[in-house]
């Protein structure tokens, strides 16, 4: 029974990275599309506010009788910002620290939704391995061996995907992301391995269909 479990989960762990990539593609696509759009909208709002403020300063200076050199300087600054406003390339890389509160909230919500979906899929994979481990070890006194080997099979595909990501440049935020998902994966696997009954709450619908 052990070797049957080992071979089955081993084969599935080879396939899993490709399945996982397909499953999270919609969430990552949503993140990639919406986030730049929100930053662009925020950038336009900030630039329009700055242009309005400069217009007010310019009008005030004209009333006060400022010299033409000072007025031209303000006008040049207005023209520069108007140019930025019509430059999509600039708007796409506008300083994210200047994003509006509304955009920052939306960004956080998108991150929570995408991150939550990824964690849900990670726990689903962990739950499947744990169920298989319990199923194959029903007549064994060494269930912990099945669960230990299962953990290796559970995290192996993610380590492989992480190593592929590291072949390209990895930012500090990506490093934190790897660490976060690694810790969450360990906690989730241990929790469901110790309390397998709780698997039915988030994933009962899936396993009812899978084992039908």
Image (cartoon, rainbow, N blue to C red):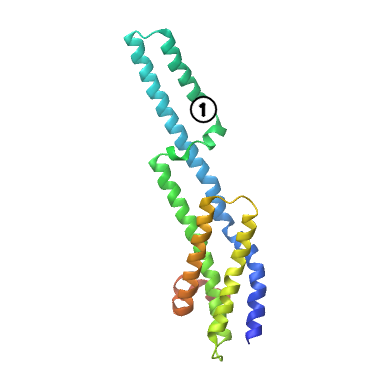
Residue 84, placed above or below residue 69: below
User: x, y (%) of residue 210?
Assistant: 57, 75
Does residue 211 appear in the picture of this structure? no
Residue 185, placed above or below residue 148: above
Question: Is residue 10 found left or right of 102 in the rendered image?
Answer: right
| Residue at point 46%, 34% (across, down) | 43
Q: Residue furthest left?
A: 64
Which residue is more in the foreground, 88 or 96?
Answer: 96
| SS at badge 1 | helix
Residue 11, placed above or below residue 36: below
| Residue at point 36%, 11% (across, down) | 62
Q: Which quadrant would the C terminus be assigned to in this image?
A: bottom right
Residue 156, placed above or below residue 38: below
Q: Which quadrant would the N terminus be assigned to in this image?
A: bottom right
Does residue 184 appear in the picture of this structure? yes
User: x, y (%) of residue 135?
Assistant: 56, 84
User: x, y (%) of residue 42?
Assistant: 45, 37
Which residue is under mark 1?
Answer: 84
| Residue at point 58%, 85% (across, down) | 136
Q: Residues within 10 Å of mark 1 (few under 14, many from 20)?
A: some
Question: Is residue 14 found left or right of 98 in the rendered image?
Answer: right
Q: Across the whole image, how many numbered discs are drawn on residues?
A: 1
Which residue is more in the foreground, 12 or 168?
Answer: 168
Which residue is more in the foreground, 32 or 176?
Answer: 176
User: x, y (%) of residue 171?
Assistant: 55, 50
């Amino acid at each position: 029974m052990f070797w049957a479990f080992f071979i089955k989960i081993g084969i599935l762990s080879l396939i899993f990275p490709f399945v996982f990539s397909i499953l999270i593609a919609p969430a990552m696509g949503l993140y990639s599309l919406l986030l730049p759009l929100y930053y662009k909208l925020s950038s336009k709002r900030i630039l329009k506010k700055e242009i309005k403020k400069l217009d007010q300063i310019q009008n005030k200076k004209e009333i006060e009788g400022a010299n033409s050199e000072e007025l031209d300087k303000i006008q040049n600054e207005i023209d520069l910002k108007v140019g930025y406003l019509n430059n999509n390339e600039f708007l796409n890389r506008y300083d994210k620290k200047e994003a509006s509160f509304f955009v920052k909230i939306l960004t956080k919500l998108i991150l929570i939704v995408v991150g939550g979906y990824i964690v849900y899929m990670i726990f689903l994979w962990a739950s499947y391995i744990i169920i298989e481990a319990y199923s194959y070890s029903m007549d064994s006194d060494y269930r912990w061996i099945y669960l230990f080997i299962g953990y290796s099979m559970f995290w192996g595909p993610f380590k492989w995907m992480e190593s592929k990501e590291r072949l390209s440049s990895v930012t500090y935020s990506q490093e934190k992301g790897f660490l976060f998902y690694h810790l969450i994966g360990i906690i989730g696997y241990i929790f469901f391995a110790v309390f397998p009954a709780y698997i039915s709450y988030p994933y009962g619908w899936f396993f009812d269909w899978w084992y039908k």
